[in-house]
Structures are given as structure tokens and as C-alpha cells.
Image (cartoon, grey):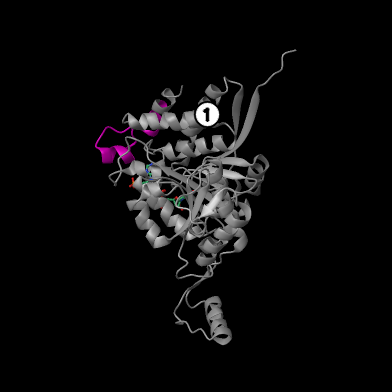
Amino acid sequence: MALDLRKELVIPVIPGDGIGPEVVAVTKKLIDAAVNASTAGYVSIRWQEVLAGEAAFNATGEWLPGSTLGDIRAKGVALKGPLTTPVGGGIRSLNVAIRQALDLYASVRPVRYFEGVPSPVKEPQRLNVVIFRENTEDVYKGLEWRCGSKEALGIMAFLKSAHGVELSQDSGIGLKPISESASKRLIRAALSHAVKKKLKSVTLVHKGNIMKFTEGAFRDWGYELARDEFPESVVSESDLRARGLGAVPDGMVLLNDRIADNMFQQILTRPDEYSVLATPNLNGDYLADACAAQVGGLGLAPGANMGDDVAVFEAVHGTAPKYAGKNMANPCSAMLSGAMMLEHLGYEPASKMVVEAVASALSEGVLTQDLARLAGTKSYGTVEFASEVMARLP
Ligand code: NAP
């Protein structure tokens, strides 16, 4: 009897709110086609729709049903559209809630240039970085208290009595915890990625000159981790100096660090010197969008939120409500996030096909309105753009 090698992958999908359902629908089609083409039809995907956001609230009265988290946990992966942050309702952000519930501690954002995309800089092709941003603490911990509240006044009273620190009574208070364990697991993920992909460097981006025990500690823990866990594959700038080496030995990854404000100017003026950036939460938030702008904007930036056991892949943009239902959204960010998911699942050829088809369409001037208006060319609707991409699959 012939062996049946056909395989069905079950992938949970959150269509999302606003433009989410439109960009996710065309992304699913593209991924289906790429998987089919790259496996000669042996592998297919069953998309398991799970609810979150407005769709979940309308159906169940809950913004983030426990069953959604359970299904994603069980499969270890999901494709997600953007979600509206509910106003009121006790949830600060659904996206943050999903990341915290599933312990998706690394926000991973590759930023590269695609030929044909209008950019505000002269040589956008010089930027090709992957940003690993810590996703669970720092300002994401959400520890802050309103000016004049009982909690803010209580903390100020404690600081004065226990530490002699006097703050203006009309202050709001925020806490910025950065732990060794969370910093190290994020930096470990960044270093492992650089080693696996044979990239030239990992840069720790921090504001340790001012915040020594949070951001400065992030940097120090990074160097300590590299020494303890990557002695054969990672070398720091100070190790190079100590060993009298003029250049990074072949096959090793350079670990260095940059103060955040300096990093912002260097990523503009010397982008090709950087390949992986590892950052605490807030620095990475700013840096990832600034880098995305350099290569053409948020419509093109893919992302993943990754933990040890679960990874959720999603476009970095939000629900862009003004374009919802109008066939005007750029689906590239969602498509490229889908490509990242395929690579994560071990379907590299399918992933490559998606990226190459998107790149080919963009380079031939097939642009959605967000880019066409900058290039001064004809614009394609979401569905028409997706058809052009599909037509470029092998
Ligand atoms: P946004 O939805 O990203 O949209 C801001 C602007 O970016 C849009 O008005 C549009 O610019 C442009 N844009 C974003 N994505 C685009 C796409 N795919 N195609 C074309 N243009 C695109 O940010 P927002 O307005 O600040 O947030 C709206 C809602 O989304 C909020 O509820 C927010 O909380 C939520 N959000 C969710 C996520 C997530 O789920 N991961 C992330 C961010 C925000 P122009 O107006 O210039 O055309």
C-alpha cells in the first residue's frame, strides 16, 4: 500500500478589527498557495478562526475569550490581525494582554528595503536589521499611578520617609522594572538568531548612561550572558581589544552596545553597520517604527511576538479604521508576517516564495495607495495587489 504523505497544518487565525480581516484574508490565500506550490500539494493549511477584539465581544461579551488563548497555546502558533484597543472595559491593550498571557517575551521585527518602494532616505537599501524588543516589562508592565491618586501619594510618602527622596506632589508616578531573567532571555533569543543566521553583529540599545540599574543593567547582563553561554560564537568589542584583535574572527558574531540617542542617529547615518538590535521595551518601540519609516512605512513592516513555546505573527500596524472595508489597505506587512510564520514552522521554501513574490510586485511598481501616493503612480486595491503577488508565485 502506498504511503500517504499528505499533511494538514492547523493554524489558529485572529482576523482582527478594522483593516485586519481584509489583509488577513489575502494573506491566508497567499500562504495557502505558497505552501501548496512548495510541497507539490502534499501540505495544506486548515485555518482555525479564533476570536478576539470586537468580533469576540460581539459574539461572546468578552474581548479576549480564554478559548482563544487555549487554542493558540495548543497549536503553538497563530496568525493575527490588528485589534482595536477597547476604550474602557478594564483592558489596557488586548495586544499586550495576549503577549502577557502567552508569555511572548520577544517582539521580533525584521526591517529591510524592497526595491521600488518610495522612501524618505537616499539609500534605504543600506538598512537591513532585525529588532528584538523585550515584550513583557519596562513600560509594558503598566505600573503607573495618576497624579493625586492615593497610590501616587502613598508611594511619594514612602520614598520620602524611607529614602529621603522628595518629589513634587503634583507628579504622576510610573515604575520601570527591568529584570535580569527577562533581559537575558530576550538577549539570548537575539544572539541565537544572529549565530544561526550568521549575521555580523548584535547591538544592545540602552539608556544606561542615565538609568544605570535598569537600562545599564540590561547592557551588562547582555555581555555576561554572551560570555557565559556563547563563548565560542560571540565576541564583544572589549574582548577584541583585550585580545589585541583588529577584526572579528571568522564565523563569530560581534556583540556591542549603543546608547539609544546615538543609535537613532547611527541607524540613519551608518545603517549598514548594524544587523541585530536587542532592546528593552520602550527603546525598541520607538526604534522599530523609525526603522520601518526609513524603508517605506508601517504598511511594509512584518512582526512576530515569540515565546519559548508559542509564537504569534502579526503586522505591526494597527486597525487603520479609516480604510476599513474600503479595499485600500496595504497587505504587505501581514503577508511578510505570514512568511516569517512559514519559516518558523520549517517551511523555508514557501516563506521565500512569499517574500520574493511581494518583492517582485513592488519592484514592478505594483503599489497600494499608501505607497502609490508617494511615488505618484497608479494605486492598486488590497485585493488587486494580492492578485498581482499571487501571479508572481512560481
Ligand atoms: P494604525 O492603525 O497603524 O494606523 C495609522 C495610520 O497608518 C493609518 O491612518 C494609515 O496612514 C497608516 N496605515 C497603517 N497600516 C496601514 C496599511 N496596512 N495600509 C495603509 N496604511 C496604513 O495606528 P492607529 O491609528 O494609531 O491605531 C488604530 C487602532 O489600532 C487603535 O485602536 C490601536 O490601539 C490599534 N493598534 C493595534 C495594533 C495591533 O493589533 N498590533 C498595533 C497598533 C495599533 P494614513 O492615514 O497616512 O494613510
Choose between 167 and 329: the one closer to the eye.
167
Q: Residue at x 35, y 41 (%)?
A: 125
Examine the structure image and report whether residue 363 is included in the region drawn in magenta: no
Q: Residues within 10 Å of mark 1 (few under 14, many from 20)?
A: many
User: Would you say the beta carbon of the disc 1 residue lies within 8 angstroms of ligand 1?
Assistant: no
Choose between 176 and 239: the one closer to the eye.
239
In the displayed structure, would residue 247 be above or below residue 3?
A: below
Percent x, y for residue 62? 59, 51
Q: Give the range drawn in magenta.
A: 367-387
Q: In this view, does 115 lie to the left or right of 306?
A: left
Q: Main secondary structure of the magenta part?
A: helix
Q: In this view, does 6 lie to the left or right of 183?
A: right
Residue at the outermost left position: 376
Q: Which residue is drawn at 50% across and 65% down?
A: 215
Residue 77 position by quadrant: top right
Quadrant in which the N terminus is drawn: top right
Choose between 352 and 296: the one closer to the eye.
352
Mark 1 sits on what residue?
Answer: 350
In the displayed structure, would residue 224 be above or below residue 332?
A: below
Q: Look at the numbered disc 1 and give the secondary structure of its residue.
A: helix
Q: In this view, does 221 lie to the left or right of 282?
A: right
Examine the structure image and report whether residue 369 is included in the region drawn in magenta: yes
Residue at the outermost top position: 1
Choose between 218 and 74: the one closer to the eye.
218
Q: Specify whether residue 105 is in view.
A: no
Three-letter amino acid code of the residue under disc 1: Ala
Percent x, y for residue 241? 48, 58
Percent x, y for residue 130? 47, 46
In the displayed structure, would residue 342 be above or below residue 283?
A: above
